[in-house]
Each structure stands twice: as C-alpha cells, then as structure tokens.
Amino acid sequence: MRVYIFTDLEGVGGVVLPRQVLQPQDAMYEEARFYLTREVNSAIEGALEAGAEKILVLDGHGANNAYNLILEELHPEAEVIVGSPWGRYIPYVEEGWDAIFCIGFHSMAGSRGVLEHTMSSSSWVNAYLNGKKIGELAFVAGYAGYYDIPVTLVTGDDAVCQEAKELLGEEVETVAVKRALSRTSARCLNPRKVRDLIRESAKKSLLNLRRIKPLKVEEPVVLRIEFLRTDMAQGYRGREGIKAEERAIEVEGANIVEAIERFLGNL
C-alpha cells in the first residue's frame, strides 16, 4: 500500500493566528512547525499500522518557500518533498498511490473556519470549479481523483471537516483538531489527543479503503478564480485556454489536471 500525505499549516491543532503561519523565525511559527511535524508523524504511524509500505510527504504550505516540516523530527519511514516550486501541482502523483491524506488543511475562503482562504489570503477572493465554489481541498481531491486516488483522511478545524464530508462523502475520515470560534480563534484539543486521533483515523481510513471513492470532476472543466484587484488578473491575458476579465480569470481544460496545470503555467 502506498500513501501520499499533502500538508498545510493553518489547520494544525493550536494554530489560530497569522503570525503562526506567515512569519518564519517567529517563535510561534517555530512552535507551529513542531505541531505540524508531530501530526504528520501520527498519520504516518497510522498508515504503517494499516500496512503501508511507501509514504511520501509533500510540504504544501507556501510560507518559508514550502519548508515548514522539521525534517530531523519527521518519521524515518517517510520520504518528503520540501521547497518550491515543485513543478506539477501534486508531484509524482503518476507513480500510483492508494490514498492521499490531507493534514493540517483549512476551509475555503468565506467560510466560518480558522484562517480561512483559498490558495492565497492576500490575492484570491473565491475559486469555482464548473460553477461551484471550492477550496483547496477540492483542488487536491479533484486532481488526485483524476488518477483514481481517493482522499481518505482530512484533518483541520470543524469547518474543513464539514467541507470534506460534503465534498467527498460521509465515508472519508476526518479529525477536527479544533472548533472555530472566529477566523483567529478556536477551541482546541490537547496536542497529544490530536495525535492519537490522527493516528487512529489514518489507520481506519486505510482499513476501509474500498469504501472511499476518488472524487471525479465532470469534464470538460472550467476553473474560475476571482482576485482581489484588477492587476492580479491582467498577467493572464493572452494565455491559451485562459479568459481574463477585469478581476477574474476562467481557465479551460479537458480535465481538472489540465486546467490546474494550465493555470500554473505548466502547459
């Protein structure tokens, strides 16, 4: 069994403030890195208990050039991708994986969640896939689903866990590590409790793997992104398969992978 772990930072237990995810060398950011690494280790432990033979971790949080995990503390049985850019949206996805875990994820822009946003809290307003508003979880799940890989575990606050159930179905395992009170406040579980829950849910998700289906996106695909300012959309003018409006763009693709890679400039 092969497991791919995609990480973020805003959805980690105990993380509620912008300084914890945006300011490297800040003591609170360093603490958040520690919490993240321990949560990832718990997911790795659960996967190994379920029989995983290969595990790859992608450090997916953009701050600090996507170098957020504490490598010396990371479980030795996992390989890891750190640094940016990393080329494809999910590198090495074509190698074939049985499941994807989304650890430390946050809810979509405009939701009630802690540190909610979609891709960029400073430039993106909303994203839509075939007319439906989506968050980063849908980007990952849809991309992986094209390769028949299901997202089997999602961890973060209660808002992203609800988003996961609505997007992926009730069978997906979720761990609500905190309950959102506002964008910068939450009722948090003890970190030790969080790690126990993640380990058990990771294991359970793989033992129930056949019950969790990949997310399949209707094709062809239109990805719409609304930006904060008009200048943020102008750089896309004239690019093949992309229609630029005053403050938004629409990216066309035969499938979700093509649309995302076209947006990223990889096509």
Image (cartoon, grey):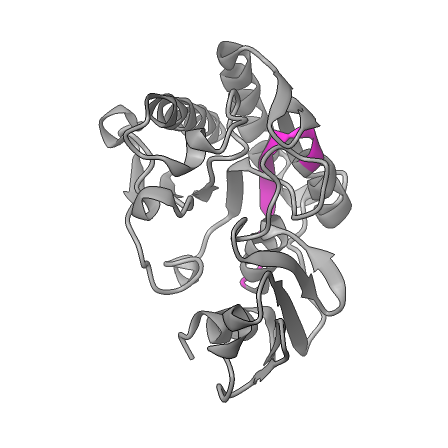
Residue 37 seen: yes
Give the vertical position of 57 relative to 150 (above or below): above
Side of 61 where 165 appears, left or right: right
Viewer-closest of 47 and 256: 256
Count of marks, rendered view: 0
Span highlighted in magenta in the image: 147-159
Residue 33: percent from left, percent from top: 36, 28
Give the vertical position of 84 relative to 201 (above or below): below
Give the vertical position of 146 relative to 267 (above or below): above
Q: Is residue 149 magenta?
A: yes
Residue 86: percent from left, percent from top: 32, 58
Image quadrant containing the C terminus: bottom left
Viewer-closest of 52 and 56: 56
Residue 53: percent from left, percent from top: 37, 38
Give the residue at x 32% y 27%.
26
Side of 135 where 58 appears, left or right: left
Which quadrant of the structure image shows residue 251?
bottom right
- In this view, the residue farthest toward the left is 72
Give the vertical position of 146 relative to 42 (above or below): below
Give the residue at x 66% y 75%.
221
Which quadrant of the structure image shows residue 209?
top right
Residue 39: percent from left, percent from top: 45, 25
Residue 52 seen: no
Image quadrant containing the N terminus: top left
Q: Is residue 39 magenta?
A: no
Viewer-closest of 229 and 1: 229
Which quadrant of the structure image shows residue 56?
top left
Side of 105 where 125 appears, left or right: right
Give the residue at x 53% y 57%.
123
